[in-house]
Image (cartoon, rainbow, N blue to C red):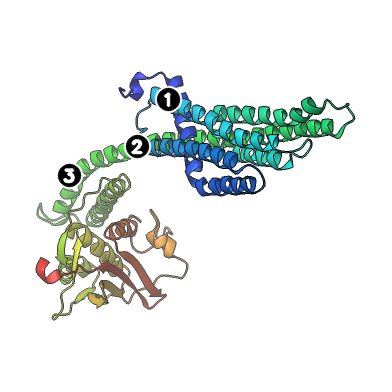
Amino acid sequence: MAVIEHMNIDPALLGRTRRLEKQLRDYVTITRKLVWQRQAIFFAATVLAASYYNASIAFSTYAAVLATEVVDHVMAFRVSNWDTTNAQPDRARRYLWWTMANTVLSATAICAFVFGLALQQPVGEHFTPLFFLFAAALFAAMNNHQVIQALILRLIIYGVTFLSIALLDIIRVRPPLDSVLWLHFFTTLFVLYFIIDCSYVFVQLYRANLRQLDRLTEEHRRTKAAYKVKSEFVSTVSHELRTPLTSIKGSLDLINSGMLGKLPEKMEPILAIAGRNSGRLADLINDILDLQRIESGEMTYRFKTLDVGELVLEAAASNQGFADNYGVTVHAEVPEDDAFPVRGDEVRLIQVLTNILSNAIKFSNQDGEVRIGCHRMKNRVRIFVQDRGVGIPEGARGKVFDKFTQVDSSDQRSVGGTGLGMNISRQIVHHHGGSIDYVSKLGEGTTFFVDLDLTPNYEDEL
């Protein structure tokens, strides 16, 4: 059967097909989930009937019920493995007819079992078969309401059997209206109403859940569409801003370097501020682009075996110039007699260490020292960055790792930043299967640490 693509199918038909697919999947899920419960009930009823009535009738009807159970599970297996990526109305209808046909066979087998018991009993003593039938009808109302066509068919067959058993004695005896047999008949009508009412309640609850699911699905679709538009907008604007900003920043850096001649004394501080702010704006754009790539799953990683010790030394060396601007010394501590191999992306891990180091440097005191190093922790390696700066107050962990947040968010804060670096770092570390955290004491400093899994058999990989 040819698969009908979404673009070639009527929207109304597509909606009905999707709802039917959902109902069939829910139906077979319950069928498979309650298989042992149903079998226990069927077998117990069969043993009771065989013990007190005709055993051959009991076991033969039980065999018929088992046969319909096998058919149900064959269909459940096929529906569970049904690829519903594209709408397939013909297949959905075929599974529906299959469900309804087997429902007729299953309900008929159960009713044959029950009616066979009633025929073997004296007049007015049909409690056992009627109770079995009531239990079967209630079970169907509770668990087979996903496909309402099948539920209606089953309840009709059960209802006819209920009335047949109740009328059986009336036809045999032809009692007056004040006879207890007519009371049994009217009680049967009341039980049928109760079963129908229960079925209606379960169907309404299920349909309400389906409507809620449809609303959530539509809301999810709209959210994804809005998120896609937002991501594309952010990416486009950021790329468009980065090109002219690079030229502006380069020109300002060239002017501030004095290569174009000595600047007038009054212009120097203004151009210096412009240079610093253009750098901050460039960092913000780069961080926004990184965050957008991470959130959209477009961030690329090139994993290979790396030595963490070498990463630490490289990060310390590459950030020493930045530290000199703040009058801070970066000191690297890497054990010489140990190797720390991990599977990771060198560029991204250096980005993480640079984010942590730059924060440690900015929040350190003048003439302070920042230590960066690594050490083994069983089958993991810990990279640490320690400063003796202002520290982080308690309860600020959310601000440290959230987007566009800083611990000091006031207008008078002494250092700048995008508020994205640590959030990006956390996502990169998590993508490496690691963890990032910190310990801090206000006024005494902070230690950030990144834990990564060591690579097994690393001697052969490095």
* 361 sits left or right of 25 in the view: left
Q: Earlier in the sequence, mark 1 or mark 3?
A: 1
Estimate the spatial distance between the alpha carbons at disc 1 and disc 3, rounded to whole Å. 65 Å
- Evaluate if marks 2 and 3 touch, with contact meaning CB atoms under 8 Å apart: no
Please, what is the three-letter code of the amino acid marked with disc 2? Lys
User: Which-is-in-front pick, marks 1 and 2?
Assistant: 1
* 402 sits left or right of 241 in the view: right
* Residue 352, quarter of picture: bottom left
* Residue 212, quarter of picture: top right
Residue pictured at 72% horizontal, 35% vertical = 194
User: Which-is-in-front pick, marks 2 and 3?
Assistant: 2
Q: Nearer the viewer, residue 354 or 320?
A: 354
The relative height of residue 283 versus residue 25 in the rendered view (above or below) is below
Residue hosting label 3: 247
Which quarter of the rendered picture does the N terminus lie within? top left
What percent of the width, then of the height, locates residue 362? 30, 67
* 288 sits left or right of 214 in the view: left
